[in-house]
């Protein structure tokens, strides 16, 4: 924009502000302006609620679906991962939608697709439609989540940005809690999984309708050259003069207008390094194990002693309660404490709690390798045996609530009785060797102390994640990229996020089968410690600063080098000085 255009804009800003001063003063007393900002933020964060709900409900729904559709372990992994696959696909092209059509339009569009995907899920009962419906919902909630975080960051004032963005994660964990809760409520209801999925429709409808009456992001409007509309939106959202903020946005947009998608992979303005920070952060968010704890919570808890579907689902609901409780202080304190401090605290607690959980699982003598149960064929011939006699043979239907298998427990000489296939009976009567682990159903009780210590360790781990990686990743990602390519950058990071999540979730049961559940947990603990090191070295502190100030600092060529070296250099200077003093003294 030339100097004449800038002067006209400034003159118009001052004139418009005078016209609205009296009304703004009244709105401030009534809380109207702040209420409008809060309303827009809360409606946008319904996207987080739907994402969390879809993540939470599958843990309980899978317990019913694997019996109704006779899902093998591999198909169970596919059902869980289909949502992530859809999220990955949309993330690859979502940046264009976000930057071309805007955050508001994207949120409305994805709400509609959430409804469509849910109708597919509950309208048809087959493995194929289950995969398709979950994939459509995954596309919707993933793109909606990205759009809502960007929308909130761009409408919020700098002193409230962290709190409002963290509202998204609070809604995610509330969604997870309700997903667990409704899973428990419908666990014993015939076709209860349909009710679990269907509950996602009302909030999606509410969000789509309400967003029609909320403003477009002022930064997006400025990017499209709609200065008057941007000013009007800022006046709605602020209780103070918006002139300075609008001019700052205008200046920054002018500087960033030359950015292209390929600049994400170049050194210009340190954008490539910023992208690597974002990618690494979401990578750690996945490889520290949280997705699998959510997706397979009920299954994991069944493997450590909570044997019935209802007990396992109720225990996993406790994880949802802790996630909500842990997120609340993060939301309230992020603008004062800062996202970096929360990330450090959370990674330490995660490391300790996961290490404890690994030791407890290892010492529980459950010897769990695979926590998956493939359904038992109803046409297979089974033997009912004990360690000394064979009591009979026949076509026996094993009840759906029969205790879970310990697949590697081949030596069952201490068991009084059990089920096994005819093929699993090795020659002589009384030789108790089970060859088909997924069919053998053997129960060994875990001591009460170890069972509850496992649950407590899980709760601490979930709480630590909820004050750190859960909300703070969204805060950091919404702040570190230039506005001109923020949508594209976040989409690339989101694609890595969902891709990593897909791989982790799709292979969880297989990896657990190969190396055992304790070793998987120890691996998560090691990654949590690596996260701590990464945060200390690379994550910038952004509290109390505008998006434009953050972008300008990160664009400095020596910014990241200074972050790594500024603690080391004074110490080196001190050592050199001490050495010189020592040499001078000896002379």
Image (tube, rainbow, N blue to C red):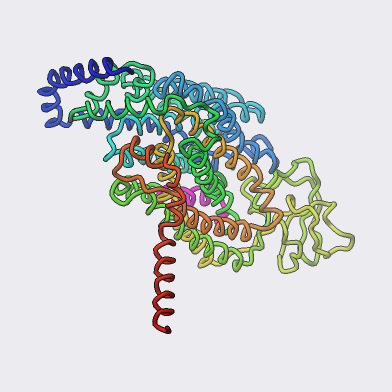
Decide if residue 432 is on the left or right side of residue 351.
right
Pick out the residue farthest to the bottom: 586
- Magenta region: which residues? 306-322
Where residue 124 sits, quadrant-wise, is top right
Counting every numbered tag in the picture gives 0
Instruction: Determine the residue positioned at 78% across, 40% down.
Output: 379
In the image, residue 318 lies in the stretch drawn in magenta:
yes
Main secondary-structure element of the magenta-colored stretch? helix
Q: Where is residue 313 shown, x and y percent of the image?
A: 51, 47
Where residue 92 sits, quadrant-wise, is top right
Q: Where is residue 82 shown, x and y percent of the image?
A: 61, 34
Decide if residue 81 is on the left or right side of residue 13.
right
Name the residue nearer the viewer: 28 or 207. 28
In the image, residue 464 lies in the stretch drawn in magenta:
no
Name the residue nearer the viewer: 361 or 436. 361
Instruction: Determine the residue positioned at 80% across, 67% down.
Output: 388
Which quarter shows the N terminus? top left
Q: Where is residue 374 shown, x and y percent of the image?
A: 70, 45
Name the residue nearer the viewer: 81 or 313. 81
Residue 519 in view here:
yes
Which quarter shows the C terminus? bottom left
Instruction: Determine the residue positioned at 66% across, 45% down.
Output: 507
């Amino acid at each position: 924009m030339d100097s004449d255009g800038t002067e006209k804009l400034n003159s118009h800003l001052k004139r418009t502000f005078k016209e609205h001063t009296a009304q703004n003063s009244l709105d401030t007393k009534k809380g109207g302006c702040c209420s409008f900002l809060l309303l827009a933020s809360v409606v946008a964060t319904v996207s987080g609620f739907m994402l969390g709900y879809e993540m939470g409900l599958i843990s309980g729904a899978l317990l019913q679906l694997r019996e109704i559709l006779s899902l093998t372990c591999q198909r169970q992994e596919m059902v869980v991962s289909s949502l992530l696959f859809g999220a990955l696909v949309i993330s690859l092209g979502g940046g264009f939608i976000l930057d071309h059509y805007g955050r508001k339009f994207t949120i409305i569009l994805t709400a509609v697709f959430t409804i469509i995907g849910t109708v597919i899920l509950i309208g048809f009962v087959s493995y194929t439609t289950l995969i398709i419906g979950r994939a459509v919902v995954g596309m919707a909630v993933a793109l909606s989540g990205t759009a809502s975080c960007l929308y909130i960051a761009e409408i919020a004032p700098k002193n409230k940005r962290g709190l409002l963005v963290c509202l998204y994660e609070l809604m995610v964990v509330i969604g997870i809690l309700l997903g667990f809760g409704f899973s428990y409520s419908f666990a014993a209801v015939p076709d209860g999984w349909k009710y679990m999925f269907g509950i996602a429709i009302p909030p999606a409808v509410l969000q789509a309708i309400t967003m029609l009456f909320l403003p477009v992001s002022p930064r997006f409007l400025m990017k499209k050259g709609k200065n008057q509309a941007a000013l009007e939106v800022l006046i709605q959202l602020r209780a103070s003069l918006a002139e300075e903020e609008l001019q700052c946005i205008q200046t920054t947009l002018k500087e960033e207008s030359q950015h292209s998608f390929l600049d994400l992979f170049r050194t210009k303005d340190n954008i490539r390094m910023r992208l690597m920070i974002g990618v690494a952060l979401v990578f750690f968010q996945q490889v520290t194990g949280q997705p699998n704890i959510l997706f397979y919570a009920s299954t994991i808890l069944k493997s450590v002693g909570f044997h019935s579907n209802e007990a396992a689902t109720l225990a996993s609901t406790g994880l949802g309660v802790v996630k909500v409780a842990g997120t609340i202080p993060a939301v309230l304190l992020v603008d004062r404490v800062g996202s970096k401090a929360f990330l450090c605290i959370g990674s330490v607690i995660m490391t300790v709690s996961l290490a404890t959980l690994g030791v407890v699982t290892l010492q529980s003598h459950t010897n769990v390798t695979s926590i998956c149960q493939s359904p038992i064929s109803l046409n297979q011939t089974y033997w009912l045996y004990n360690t000394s006699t064979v009591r009979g043979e026949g076509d026996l239907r094993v009840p759906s609530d029969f205790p879970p298998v310990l697949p590697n427990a081949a030596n069952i000489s201490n068991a009084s009785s059990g089920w096994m296939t005819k093929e699993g009976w090795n020659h002589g009567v009384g030789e108790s060797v089970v060859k088909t682990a997924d069919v053998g159903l053997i129960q060994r009780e875990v001591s009460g102390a170890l069972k509850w210590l496992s649950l407590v360790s899980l709760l601490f781990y979930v709480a630590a994640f909820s004050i750190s990686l859960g909300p703070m990743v969204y805060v950091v990602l919404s702040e570190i990229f230039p506005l001109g390519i923020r949508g594209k950058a976040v989409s690339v990071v989101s694609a890595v996020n969902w891709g990593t999540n897909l791989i982790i979730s799709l292979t969880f049961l297989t990896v657990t089968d190969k190396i055992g559940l304790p070793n998987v947990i120890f691996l998560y603990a090691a990654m949590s410690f690596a996260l701590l090191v990464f945060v200390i070295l690379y994550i910038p502190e952004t509290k109390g600063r505008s998006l434009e100030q953050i972008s300008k600092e990160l664009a400095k060529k020596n910014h990241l080098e200074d972050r790594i070296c500024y603690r080391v250099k004074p110490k080196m200077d001190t050592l050199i000085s001490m050495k010189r003093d020592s040499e001078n003294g000896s002379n």
